[in-house]
């Protein structure tokens, strides 16, 4: 059956190393709270340059599958 | 009084039938958890084609009214 | 250490006065629930004109810092 | 001779059934007033969700051919 | 019944005071000619700086409801 | 006094020669009906290739000044 | 192993019935020539209105998996 | 019958003279290989300035009609 | 004679009061260094929310007329 | 002589390591089939997160020079 | 060695003749001040229509190579 | 006091290694001339493929704080 529902959340990860590492940081944090992560989309890449640093900042939208309401305990919630 | 606040959540609905049906699937799931849904915006339309199927996938942003904090029990929460 | 994670939520504030006031309305509501607000981005400005009114409506994405999971009680949650 | 001029007007059609039907509603209304309709472009798809409904709303730009000024009676006018 | 049709027109309002005032100027002018104004969308914000001035310029799309053709006298016309 | 209002209309001009000529075609037609044309913006450039031709097609938004309502006879009308 | 390569092709399907049907028309044609179709993205929705018709036109980008070069006979080619 | 399928290809033409001429260069090359060209869309206009030159570069998407598979010899192929 | 050249520079102004005031801050600073300012375009509106503040931040592109090179002392320079 | 023509093809490369590596994967595959590759543009960056993985996915448009038709054997073909 | 740095500047050229000529006007002015111009991108095409004129206005971003700092006298400066 | 002004400059960095390295190249060059760099935004990622190479090219907008005019010696200048 093909009726599935996913939710997207917007998160920003930062890193001193690279954009790829900033994505890993953001995804690792998302995995602490959300189950059934499915895919992400890169929305924006920026960076901080103050005090001689170079900080990579990536804005992602991360999507995960929503279970049906009566199965809410085993998946993410909508709000 | 005109000071209202709404929150938007991003959800993806899928269907074997049509984009309109994928929207209905997503909205029905949102109604299980959220009250006072107000409007939605279609962000993206994609589809899956693997194994001979044609799956319609619609990304929506769905908006609902936020009650004042002391009335949080009767409406959606911000986070 | 530079590995931080932020979450963005989309909110819409309305006002009879101006777009700047509609932003204040939305931010004040976000502060009731979320700690460590960091920045916002204006996504869209619209308005209502029915019955002779002029209502300013601003869609914002508001970002706040996510604490590590074991510190979730002192910060926002991801979902 | 290839020197033709078209005008575009922006209209929004709504329907309880589907986006395709909302387009039909908008085009049917345009045909009451405009002759020589040529093509349309879908600009935005939104919807209303209040009171348990699901209303499809489509914003179109509809284009029709402008006749030369001395033939204005048989075609659309520019303003 | 949910089959409604709206028309959008693009107008630019200018003001010496603020963008919010420029919107009020544009909407006030639209109300001289159009009935049943419903909503507007801000498309662009620019400004003039010549001769030491600061002029706020806002481009809006303003939408109003179209009556059925036989009721055209009480509402806006399509072209 | 800085409170002026302009209206924008969308027109498409075509030409066998060049995009610049297609713009001239569209502007010449607009001048037959509209007074106080002020500026235009190029929105899209396309072309027709059927039957060995190359037809240039330019979509413009053309803006003209709206007089106050009681002076409508000397300028463009809003709808 | 995660090193895969896909190619995207842009196709336009048309239908008298609906946008969903126009997508089916385009995908059915792509399946005559391409193997291992994976997903599609809707890029644009337009339509034809001449002679009283309403023709739905959908522009898609359709993606399929590219096999390694020495396996070109069993999959799509790059150009 | 309204079920037609078109394919779009992206080509870049360059010229020392003008953007219009760069389009002619690209279209002339496309006509050497493709039949039933239908329309094009201008995607981007850039230019080269090295060594004192001014080279016009236009990126187009050119669309042509796809015949049914059993008629592939008389038209373009999908890949 | 119509051959004029303008240069655009991107500046960000901030204010505690409103977006309109942030624009005034940015324009006032530009007027300290640049002559013949002509117009500006609003590119982005963001804000800072740390420590309970609400700081309005506006990104503008400000355009000013470039004199011919031999008159560079009385106008802006290109780089 | 400045009349050159290039063709762009859209490819997606995936990698477990980084976006830069995903680009290398896509380009290496393109070099198996296409000669005279000239440049690429990154269109979109997404990723897969299922089953605990982090897969980087990059959508590129890759451009290569088209020879004149009578030299088609030594270069890429248009379709 | 592949580590090069370029700077982009935004300029607007105007002409009574065509968009191509407006680009030539802008580029000729840039060449008075900047060395090692490399490429440009067309950002926007607009025009002036007041007093019966048709003035073509093109906004370009022009890029030139930055030498290393100790060679600043022979190239463009960064600010 | 919250009235600050920043200027943005557009620079392109190139590298044989990765997009992250190309950003470092661009930022290092900017630091030779500009003080008080604050942040950057990635605008575009492209690359060169000629002669078997793979060159990463990143277009950034880099922002730095502008001091008041009488303090121009210690900061960046506006033009």
Image (spheres, coloured by chain):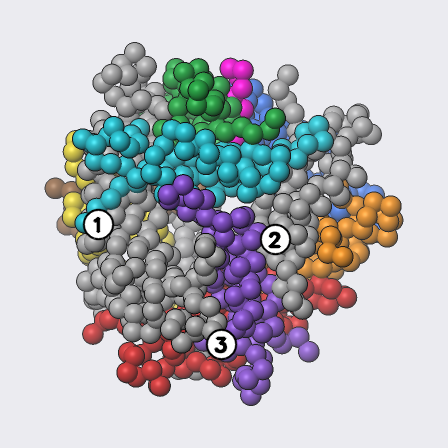
Chain colours: A brown, B yellow, E red, F purple, H cyan, I orange, J green, L blue
Label 2 lies in what chain? I
Q: Are marks 2 and 1 in contact (CB under 8 Å)?
A: no
- Same chain, marks 2 and 3? no
Nearest the viewer among B79 and I30 is I30
Task: State the residue position of label 3.
Answer: F78
Report the magenta residues as a range.
L44-53
Q: Is residue L45 in the magenta section? A: yes
Nearest to viewer (mark 2 / mark 3): 3
Task: Name the image quarter holding residue B6.
Answer: bottom left
User: Can you say which quadrant of the picture contains the N terminus of chain F?
Assistant: bottom right
Residue highlighted by disc 1: H2
Disc 1, disc 3: CB below 8 Å? no
B39, J60: nearer the viewer: J60
Mark 3, secondary structure of its residue: loop
**L70 relative to H75, above or below:** below
The residue tagged 2 is: I59
Residue E7 shows up from this direction: yes
Hey, which residue is sitting farthest left in the picture? A1
Q: Quadrant of residue J30?
A: top left
Please check the rendered image and state whether residue E38 is part of the magenta-colored stretch, yes or no. no
Image location (x, y in percent) of residue L40? 60, 40
State the count of labels.
3
Do the residues at pointers 1 and 3 share their chain? Answer: no
Neighbor class of circle 2 (other Cα within 10 Å; few <14, some 14-19, many 20+) is: many
Q: Which of the 4 quarters of the picture holds residue F51?
A: top left
């Amino acid at each position: 059956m093909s009726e599935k529902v996913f939710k997207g959340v917007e998160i920003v990860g930062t890193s001193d190393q690279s954009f790829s590492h900033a994505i890993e940081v953001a995804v690792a944090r998302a995995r602490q709270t959300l189950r059934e992560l499915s895919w992400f989309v890169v929305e924006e890449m920026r960076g901080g340059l103050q005090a001689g640093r170079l900080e990579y900042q990536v804005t992602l939208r991360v999507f995960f599958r929503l279970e049906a309401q009566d199965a809410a305990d085993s998946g993410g919630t909508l709000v």
